[in-house]
Amino acid sequence: MMMDDVKGITATTRIYNFSPGPAMLSGEVLERAREEMLDWHGSGMSVMEMSHRGKEFMTIAAQAEADLRELMRIPAQYKVLFLQGGATLQFAMVPINLLRGKKSADYIYTGEWSKKSIAEAKIFCTVNIAASSEDAKFNYAPTQDQWRLDPNAAYVHYTPNETINGVEFQWIPDTGRVPLVADMSSNILSRAVEVNRFGLIYAGAQKNIGPAGLTIVIVREDLIGWALPDTPAMLDYKVQADNESMYNTPPAYALYIAGLTFQWLKKNGGITAMEKRNIEKAGLLYDFLDNSRFFRNHVRKSDRSRMNVPFTLKNTALEEEFLIQARMRGMVQLKGHRLVGGMRASIYNAMPIEGVQTLVGFMRDFEDKHG
């Protein structure tokens, strides 16, 4: 079992959770939430009981936005929206709001999540697949020289980190005057990004930020106000922005936990420090895989994800035994996605390096016994 970073959450109750999402949260954040569960800052009530328009919750929401802006260095000309529906709803909201009278959009096809976004966009516009890694079963990120962009496209959409195949772009694409849109659900806050190079960034919160139910959208102001005719109010970025994400009751508790996570990140050195930790964690696991004769990662080395590390066993018949023994050592959710099989370790921000060290130690022992 694991040691937690917070007194009060014991080694016997906390495990190393390698789930791709909903994912592991910081013990410090959970402890803070527990302390404030019944009485938030002397208010006499839980955050879950507050009016979303009351001064208490408005303070929580404003602080969360301010902290996120500070962490990501979000320019003033960008709106930060706290929405619902997950990244999946954004697959539709992006074309609904960003077509701006144009008929087509460019998409980069690098895995299952970009595939889903493409399918949804086709309902609203012509989709140009500007680049794809389908030819190699999505084990790499197409380089910029492979992209065939349309200068008249409404926007260019890509998924910087594909959780299922473990492929991550280590660079930000150059799309010229065409707005760049990114689904950062699985790597937001894990590395520094220049927000001003994007037209829009969106992310489900359940991997690096907080519990499921909250979606963050960071959108440049000039891209707001162009929704398709007859767009429902809830799907219009302008309506959401004009109402400061309070058009209806927001996912209040999820937003509160996100705010605590932002404070935890700031306390621990911000994104710069977190990126350094993530490089170290991923390097530890990939170094082991590269030197193993029993385990293998199939992703091109230059495009390996720091967040999601898939791997296979030389003897696939031992997969179930691997998972059973891992659980006995306090490690869970290591089974790979059903579409690709094998194993997968998701090592988001909240996963301490001790968790990766424990996994590598177990994998080494397993290989010694079965390899």
Image: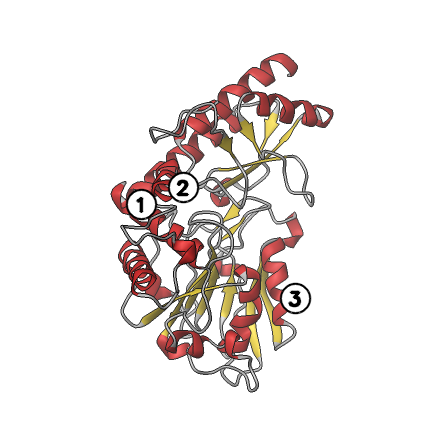
Q: Which circle marks residue 265 in the picture? A: 1
Q: Which circle marks residue 349 in the picture? A: 2
Amino acid at pointer 3: Ala
Residues tagged 1 and 2 counted as in contact (Cβ below 8 A): yes
Camera-nearest residue between 75 and 105? 75
> What kind of element bears circle 2?
loop
Q: In the displayed structure, would residue 261 be above or below residue 236?
A: above
Task: Specify whether 14 is left or right of 74.
Answer: right
Q: Residue at x 46, y 53 (%)?
A: 205
Camera-nearest residue between 311 and 319? 319
Say if residue 153 shows up in the picture.
Answer: no
Crowd class of label 2 (few under 14; some 14 to 19; many from 20; radius 10 Å)? many
Q: Earlier in the sequence, mark 3 or mark 2?
A: 3
> What kind of element bears circle 3?
helix
Q: Which circle marks residue 119 in the picture? A: 3
Q: In which quarter of the image is residue 121?
A: bottom right
Task: Specify whether 204 is left or right of 42.
Answer: right
Residue 217: x, y in percent?
43, 64
Amino acid at pointer 1: Leu
Crowd class of label 3 (few under 14; some 14 to 19; many from 20; radius 10 Å)? some
Q: Earlier in the sequence, mark 1 or mark 2?
A: 1
Camera-nearest residue between 336 and 139? 336
Tell me how far mark 3 sits from mark 2, CA to CA: 30 Å
Foreground tag (3 vs 2): 2
